[in-house]
């Protein structure tokens, strides 16, 4: 799995734009949380999507970006959290153990 790390707020506009061509996911991960680590590990083990672009946010180091994502996509901040973005909009999101149940082939 080839994560694109989000380290700058300007990347949010870029990923919104790229979601017009390809579905995008944002995985918001807390490096201090064991539940987040388990959710990330399970998600990565089950990854098999060539047509979805995966973005990764370390929300401990980039909390301001996490807050920006919550505002831009109108979702309550949670950790861990997965957002599915298509055509510039968040079409689905989940947190904690629900992350592994999201079907990325449909919105």
Image (spheres, rainbow, N blue to C red):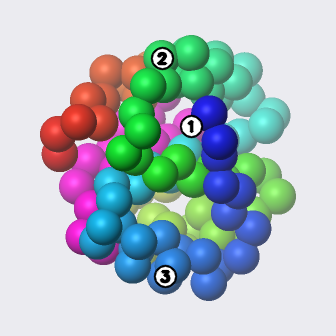
Mark 2 in CB contact with mark 3 (< 8 angstroms): no
Query: Can you identify the residue that label 2 sits on?
Result: 46
Residue 102 located left or right of residue 29: left
Region rendered in magenta: 79-96
For the residue pair 51 and 15, the one nearer the viewer reads as 51
Cα gap from disc 1 to disc 2, whole angstroms: 16 Å
Using the image as rendered, state which of residue 4 and residue 63 is in the foreground: 4
Q: Eyeballing the image, is 64 above or below 48?
A: below
Could you tell me residue 97's position as x and y percent? 44, 20
Q: CA distance from mark 1 to mark 3?
A: 22 Å
Identify the disc placed on residue 13. 3
Relative to the observer, which residue lies in front, 49 or 90? 49
Dot 1, crowdedness within 10 Å: few (<14), some or many (≥20)?
many
The question of residue 62 being in magenta is answered with no
Q: Position of residue 9 (x, y in %)?
A: 64, 79
Is disc 3 placed on a helix, strand or loop? helix
Q: Is residue 3 visible?
A: yes
| N-term-proximal mark, 2 vs 3 | 3
């Amino acid at each position: 799995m080839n994560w694109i790390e989000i380290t700058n707020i300007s990347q949010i506009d870029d990923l919104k734009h790229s979601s017009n061509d390809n579905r995008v996911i944002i995985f918001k991960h807390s490096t201090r949380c064991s539940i987040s680590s388990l959710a990330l590990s399970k998600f990565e083990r089950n990854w098999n999507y060539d047509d979805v672009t995966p973005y990764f946010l370390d929300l401990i180091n980039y909390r301001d970006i996490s807050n920006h994502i919550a505002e831009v996509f109108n979702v309550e901040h949670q950790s861990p959290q997965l957002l599915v973005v298509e055509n510039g909009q968040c079409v689905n999101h989940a947190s904690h153990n629900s992350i592994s149940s999201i079907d990325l082939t449909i919105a």
